[in-house]
């Protein structure tokens, strides 16, 4: 009777770590910071704060999941979030209703994604270069619209999408913005798993040339993916506005790194063709827990930035090792 090869014997372990690795990582960092700050970190109030902080990055990570699965990247999402907060505040100041203002923020993000998608598909430019350029251009547009200052806005129900629940609202369990994240995550997961568009996204990310030969509309799929990503970033901007209660053109600086890191930590491959919504949400939770925990143990901001960068490098390294083992 033949014995399994060492590689074959190790594959169940690789499969286990690949599927449950993000959850194990989340549990590890939570237990670590709970042990370091037992009276400050694992409290109900702090858990609620981390949930609210995860909502913005989580919604951004939903769109980024589709982009990375398709084999692309979008470095402009942080600037889209800032631009969306400014658009929402300006529309509210012009007398628009809160729903109209929120729709304006999402529409603004979607149009940014359409421009990015057209530049990538029509001019065949590299996604990294296009989105890097849009990262600066959209940040400048946000500052220009806001006259380089914070835009105050009247109080509406938008301000309470990510506000802490009162005693009378505890039956909701979590604020409306978190419920919005949950619903969108379920819809995105269903689309990627069951819809034709989802199959096309995975096909393009796995092998673009093969997908084209099989009749997949590659250019249209890429355009839709970037519009979806920026549109969700615009929605994340609406939640960011709710958290800040003002339009701030300087907010969400570096958030694109948190969003990309969340998706990669969650198991998505930067080579494309691989990724899940659940993994991205777990990755977003890991980024939030690490940031919050570093604050609780009073680490300076520069140390937190080093930790975040180290997590990103480690996630990409693990992704590369996974692919080498699979070859």
Image: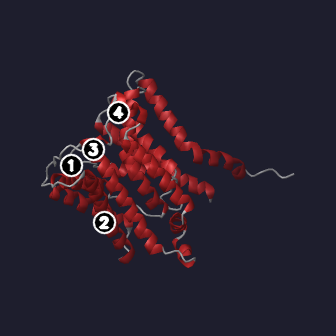
Q: Is residue 309 visible?
A: yes
Q: What residue is shown with label 3?
A: 157
Residue 61's disc number: none
Question: Dot 4 surroundings within 10 Å: few (below 14), some, or many (20 or more)?
Answer: some
Residue 226 rendering spot, x and y as whole percentages: 39, 64
Residue 138 located left or right of residue 2: left
Mark 2 burial class by Cα count in 10 Å: few <14, some 14-19, many 20+: some
Q: Quadrant of the C terminus?
A: bottom right
Q: CA distance from mark 3 to mark 2?
A: 25 Å
x and y percent of residue 205 in the render? 51, 65
Dot label at residue 165 = 4
Q: Where residue 109 appears, x then y in whole percent?
A: 31, 60
Relative to 103, is 123 above or below? below
The answer to whether any part of residue 264 appears in the image is no
- Identify the element where label 2 is drawn: helix
Name which of mark 4 and mark 2 comes first in the sequence: 2
The residue at which mark 1 appears reads as 248
| Residue drawn at 51 percent across, 54 percent down | 189
**Mark 3 vs mark 2: in front:** 3
Tag in front: 4 or 1: 4
Residue 86 vertical position relative to residue 29 in the rendered view, above or below: below
Name the mark on residue 111: 2
C-alpha distance separating marks 3 and 4: 13 Å
First in residue order: circle 2 vs circle 1: 2
């Amino acid at each position: 009777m033949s014995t399994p090869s060492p590689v074959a014997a190790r594959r169940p372990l690789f499969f286990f770590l690949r599927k449950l690795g993000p959850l194990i990582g989340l549990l590890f960092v939570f237990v670590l910071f709970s042990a370091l700050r037992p009276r400050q970190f694992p409290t109900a109030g702090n858990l609620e704060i981390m949930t609210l902080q995860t909502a913005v990055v989580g919604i951004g990570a939903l769109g980024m999941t589709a982009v990375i699965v398709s084999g692309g990247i979008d470095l402009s999402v942080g600037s889209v979030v800032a631009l969306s907060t400014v658009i929402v505040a300006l529309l509210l100041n012009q007398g628009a209703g809160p729903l109209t203002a929120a729709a304006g923020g999402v529409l603004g993000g979607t149009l940014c994604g359409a421009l990015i998608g057209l530049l990538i598909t029509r001019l065949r430019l590299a996604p990294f270069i296009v989105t890097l350029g849009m990262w600066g251009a959209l940040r400048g547009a946000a500052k220009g619209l806001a006259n380089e200052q914070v835009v105050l806005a009247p109080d509406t129900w938008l301000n309470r999408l990510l506000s802490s629940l009162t005693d009378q609202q505890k039956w909701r369990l979590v604020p409306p913005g978190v419920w919005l994240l949950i619903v969108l995550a379920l819809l995105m997961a269903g689309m990627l798993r069951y819809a034709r568009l989802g199959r096309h996204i995975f096909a393009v990310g796995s092998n673009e040339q093969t997908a084209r030969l099989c009749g997949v509309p590659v250019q249209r799929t890429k355009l839709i993916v970037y519009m979806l990503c920026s549109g969700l970033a615009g929605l994340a901007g609406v939640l960011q506005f709710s958290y800040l209660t003002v339009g701030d053109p300087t907010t969400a600086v570096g958030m694109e790194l948190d969003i990309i890191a969340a998706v990669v930590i969650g198991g998505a491959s930067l080579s494309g063709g691989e990724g899940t919504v659940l993994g991205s949400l777990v990755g977003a939770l890991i980024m939030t827990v690490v940031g919050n925990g570093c604050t609780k143990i009073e680490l300076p901001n520069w140390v937190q930035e080093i930790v975040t960068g180290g997590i990103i490098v480690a996630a990409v390294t693990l992704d590369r090792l996974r692919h080498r083992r699979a070859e």
